[in-house]
Image: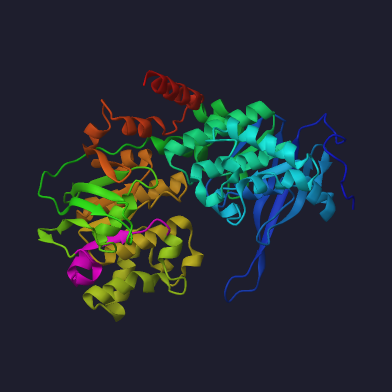
Amino acid sequence: MPDATQTRDSASSTGPLLDIRNLRIEATVYPPDEPPHDITIVEDVSLQLEKGKVLGLIGESGAGKSTIGLSAMAYGRGGVRITGGEVLVNGRDIRQLNPRGLRHLRGREVCYVAQSAAAAFNPAHRLMDQVVEATLKHGLASRAEAEERARELFGKLGLPDPDNIGQRYPHQVSGGQLQRVMTAMALCSEPDLIVFDEPTTALDVTTQIDVLAAIKDAIRDTGVGALYITHDLAVVAQVSDEIMVLRHGKLVEQGETRQIIEQPQEEYTRQLVSVRKIDHEEKSSGGKAILAAKSITAAYGSSTSDVLKEVSLEVRPGETLAVVGESGSGKSTLARVITGLLPPRRGSIEFDGRKLSKGLEGRSRDDLRELQMIYQMADVAMNPRHTVATIIGRPLEFYFGIRGRERDERVAELLDKIEMGEGFADRYPAELSGGQKQRVCIARALAADPKVIICDEVTSALDPLVAHGILDLLLQLQEEKQVSYLFITHDLATVKAIADSIAVMYQGRLVRYGPKSEVLSPPFDDYTQLLLSSVPEMEVGWLEKAISSRRMESAGN
């Protein structure tokens, strides 16, 4: 097997930069009480990418996007293996490379930008040391030259203080800044191909737009080719020349970005395009508030810095209040105060006409039952050793003393209500999809027969189509049971889909609050205007218009 010390300069340059032919990828699964067997993750997928172009890979979780992206480095994670087809980079099949050849390829010709920069960086090393590491390992430049290149990239990517930010540690920069530093790390060795794996999914919309613009500018300025992996069609439309739509490891549709956005040919693609166009008609009961936070000020521990500052808002019966804002604005802290997990320094919480104890230990069982919470990460919100029936049945036992056959019947009813069915009762969380796990968490909350449910970013980790299903379910349950929602999110598209009223938070304060029709209508305060203008639209060229508009506003100020 060749060691492929042959460089990109001596490789063929007449064909495409990346040429994947009839790719097949498999993995072995080990189900309980069954013999191990192989499953196909990617089946007969082919693509070509020219240098200087961007190909977007889009599809729901499990579609094979990241697996295909990693195949461009001849890599399969978690026991995944390439079992068929060819992967040609600069004209040679990298599947034939030996370990030395693969080490030569990775970080030199092909680089990877992970979804979570925070998890990808070593917290014990300064940023600059990590950014230049691959460049130095491959002998592509001296340390002085590599650091100068890194500082140039920091400037191009819009990072603050580009001459000195490299001396910081990962925890000393924001999530958006760290994501841009990772892009600089990928570009520093001047590769031919970069694989961007959901690089903005975990970011707030205000940060996302800056990172998207920085990535697009860097690709244009360096001429690098890129695979851009995401489940958000509106995002990939801003950076890609072509889009490949995947589902269940197979190609659904491929074409130029404008054609995919404006004239999709396949039903699945049409669903992806239309899912963001949902709008919920605002309603108002006009009744007395069932939940009211009054002048809440809160901080963590003995800190003198308040995370919440004089926050007051109300939730009315059968309505949804969306609390929106970027990370660090105080949204989840407010939820912790309302649920009693974080006693406030000042202020009070009133619920259904009574004042709640500031701390959880002082609340009655009815207080706990009537105010439920659904968490963002369903994976960590359920005991992996408990079955679905046990998870949903626990509130029935705890609050109502329902056991035995009556409990099983009630669990079956709740499973029907969340459109899963009693066949899921004996499954464990690991046997469920992301959307199914979140539905089980909804059923668990409903089992307590609550009056108010706090939903903390319950759709942010889900694919658009799955998230749409969860939002539809929540609205349907609200109609049936007149339950109220306090819906915490940073996604304005979700707000439009579910909210009756909106509270916009920034740096621990309410900056805008009222019915949805008023909050989303001009004139806007500066921060709300920034939020609304940062939500990607399903339109080719939207990013350039948004950045231009932002610069004009900054110049005007």
273 or 119: which is nearer to us?
119
Locate residue 548, reporting x and y percent.
Answer: 46, 21
Image quadrant occupied by the C terminus: top left
Q: Examine the image and state in which quarter residue 335 appears.
A: bottom left
Residue 438 x, y percent position in the rendering: 40, 58
Which residue is located at x 43 percent, y 38 percent? 205
Instruction: Please indicate whether residue 22 sits to the left or right of residue 487 in the image.
Output: right
Q: Is residue 375 magenta?
A: yes
Side (left or right) of 228 relative to 45: left
In depth, the one of 171 and 320 nearer the eye is: 171
Residue 397 in view in this figure: yes
Whether residue 264 is visible to the viewer of this picture, yes or no, is no
Which of the colour schemes (rainbow, by chain, secondary structure, one colour) is used? rainbow
113 vs 517, left or right, is right
Above or below, 485 against 239 in this view is: below
- Residue drawn 35% across the image and 64% down it: 415
- Magenta stretch: give its range: 358-377
The residue depicted at 80 percent of the width and 37 percent of the height is 90
Extreme residue toward the bottom, this view: 404
Query: Residue 548 versus residue 509: which sits nearer the camera?
Result: 509
Inspect the magenta stretch and tell me whether residue 248 lies in it.
no
